Image: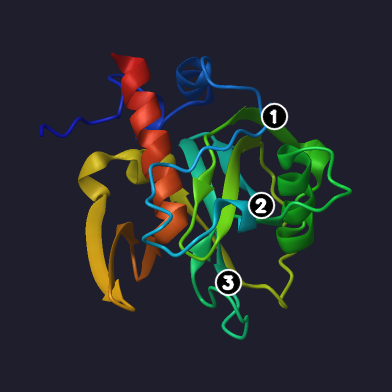
Amino acid sequence: MEQRHLLPAGEAGGGLSRNWLCRRLATLPGADAVCGPAVNGKDLAGYRLDPASLVDSAVLVPLIDRPEGLSVLLTERAAHLGAHAGQISFPGGRIEPTDPSPAAAALRETEEEVGVPPDSVELLARLDSYVTGTGYRITPVIGLICPPLRLRPDAREVAAVFEVPLTFVLEARNHRRVSHTREGVRRRYYSIGWGDRTIWGATAAILVGLSRIVVAAED
């Protein structure tokens, strides 16, 4: 399959702009749209998951609007955490009964984890829910943040915060398919290498999904 390059001709500074992205997200639901039962094509039986037992959660896909182009803000989870320790992730977590929407949950968790206040995030769109092999149904919400950033990472949950150019993570040639077998079940997932870090699992899958959306919008 031919790989397509996402960088538009003449994009200033070599990065992707806010206007470019917004044009390609125009057909997506609003960030506060009601969350549907999407399960991203997974065979839940293969993961030994009961759809009724899935835990609803939400993440913010934070895009930083820098002069040189948009970047994605990512966190490295603290090594002592019981679940997904040390993994690269978006800020987010479980949707609580007091959260009026997935978007509200994503904003609340983002403020708790990295100190970005909700009123500094412009919500752009919501992606389809993504189900993990660990039993979470994740709603990704895309949000735009304008510098300057005043981050206050919570050391109990976050070991590091870093940015990756959006043009890099959306580029198909940077998406690797990896597989491994666990408990007799062969699982395949995406992996995106950035320096000495590896973005993989749900985080990489969400970025790959976003990449496919903006490529389709270009056609």
Gap between marks 1 and 3 measured at Cα: 28 Å
Q: Earlier in the sequence, mark 3 or mark 2?
A: 2
Q: Residue furthest right?
A: 98
Gap between marks 3 and 2 measured at Cα: 16 Å
Q: Which mark is residue 57?
A: 2
Q: Secondary structure at mark 3?
A: strand
Q: Visible in this render: residue 150?
A: no
Q: Please give the name of the residue rendered at 42% of the width and 35% of the height, measured from the top-left corner.
A: 210
Q: Residue furthest bottom?
A: 80
The amino acid type found where label 1 is placed reads Val
Q: Position of residue 43 (x, y in %)?
A: 37, 51
Q: Position of residue 33 (x, y in %)?
A: 68, 26
Front one among 196 and 131 = 131
Please, is residue 192 above or below residue 168 in the view? below
Front one among 155 and 105 = 105
Q: Which mark is residue 77?
A: 3
Q: Earlier in the sequence, mark 1 or mark 2?
A: 1
Q: Please give the name of the residue rendered at 33% of the width and 21% of the height, measured from the top-left corner.
A: 216
Q: Earlier in the sequence, mark 1 or mark 3?
A: 1
Q: Is residue 195 left or right of residue 102?
A: left
Q: Which residue is mark 1?
A: 34
CB under 8 Å between callouts 3 and 2? no
The image quadrant where one finds the C terminus is top left
